[in-house]
Amino acid sequence: MDSQKNYSTEYVLITEDNVFNQYCEAWQSKNYLALDTEFMRTDSFYPKTALLQVCDGESNYLIDPLSISDWKKFKTLMLAPEITKIFHSCSEDLLVFIRQFGLLPNPVFDTQVANAFLNQGFGLSYQNMIAEQLEIDVPKGETRSNWLQRPLSVQQLDYAALDVAYLPEIYLRQKKQLAEINRLAWVEEDCQRLSRLYKEELSQDFSQTYRNISAAWQLDEMQLNILKALAEWREIRARQRDKPRNWILKDKELVTIAKLIPEDISDLSQIDGLNTNFIHYEGKALIALVQDSLRVEEKKRPEILSRPLSNGQKKIFKKAQVLVEQKAEALNLPIEVLGRKRTLISLFQEILKLKSGSTQKPIDSDKMSLPDELIGWRKEILLKELIEVLQ
């Protein structure tokens, strides 16, 4: 057991607006709040919010979103720049906040991210982190239970409170350790970057979603323009119906439609994966979308996407990976933190694009379209040498 106990596992269940608002007012004076969410998401696009947990460093609070209706003061808290919002592995929690409140908490500190920067485990679970750092076993038995049932069981409430009870202590330790090795700013930058993953969700602009489809590189400009429209339509439709996007159409089916360019319902009927029910309800809209895409001017169509790396390019790319491995070892960082494969491929493809369309002049990094992760603290450490290896 940790000798310097700085946490409580007791909790207050909040089900009334007036009580909730009183606590929100009290939390305005805090420097940080630890947060977590419980939700259900089995057959829906959006998570169904079932519980919100808050720890202010002294006590734990369980907020019932099925009973609370006045969230105004809480929303203000979530955007207060002087209050750090502490999460562990916050990606799904952030989607809950977007769905429930139409906002992203800011600023955010993710203890899973910080843990990786301290080289204490990449992607370490909350339970394992608490076990390793505080020598406390946090049960996992209620993880998959029905969080939308009411009343919640004592076991569920106890479990939910424990999910935030230890976060402030971990946060304070991590912040101190990161400051000692001059990496606190790095973690804060990466935590801030997490919110950018949801810019499409907040803006509802899905015009670039087609880029995430792995087979999109196979298409010419006309077909790619169709895929662009189809992918955008699917994103909107999934949200309208609150169903997973693959329940609407799978990536493979989107690409097939873009390749075949169907002109009528009978053409759609020939495509594997499209059932008669889908064609009956969505077919006309889909055909109209395809035909409208054909009328888009050539100059307004998206550029063909980069092909997968050739065998020769893979050998060059491997050198970049080795460079990242060496740098990560020297910095005592996980490789995944310093340079993800996806980031390196994006950089390589940008270099290949610049080389194919210009003379043999040295590549100017200031004129490149850089992956987001190479714009911040990684730029000084990696970028110059990566370009030298990859060009």
Image: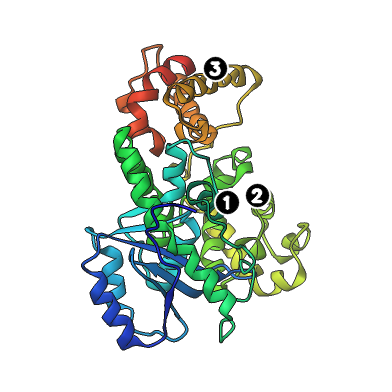
**The residue under label 2 is which amino acid type?**
Val
Question: The residue tagged with tag 1: helix, strand or loop?
Answer: helix
Q: Measured from the top left, where is residue 294 in percent x and y?
A: 55, 52
Q: Which label sits on residue 319?
A: 3
Residue shown at 59% from the left, 39% from the top: 220
Q: Is residue 91 above or below residue 332?
A: below
Residue shown at 51% from the left, 49% from the top: 129
Question: The residue tagged with tag 2: helix, strand or loop?
Answer: helix
Distance of label 2 from label 1 (alpha carbons): 6 Å
Task: List the single residue furthest toward the front.
Answer: 3
The number of discs equals 3
Say which residue label 2 marks: 255
Q: Is residue 58 left or right of residue 371?
A: left
Q: Is residue 374 left or right of residue 147?
A: left
The numbered mark, 3 or 1, whose residue comes first in the sequence reads 1
* Residue 178 picture quarter: top left
**The residue under label 1 is which amino acid type?**
Leu
The numbered mark, 2 or 3, whose residue comes first in the sequence reads 2
Say which residue label 1 marks: 227
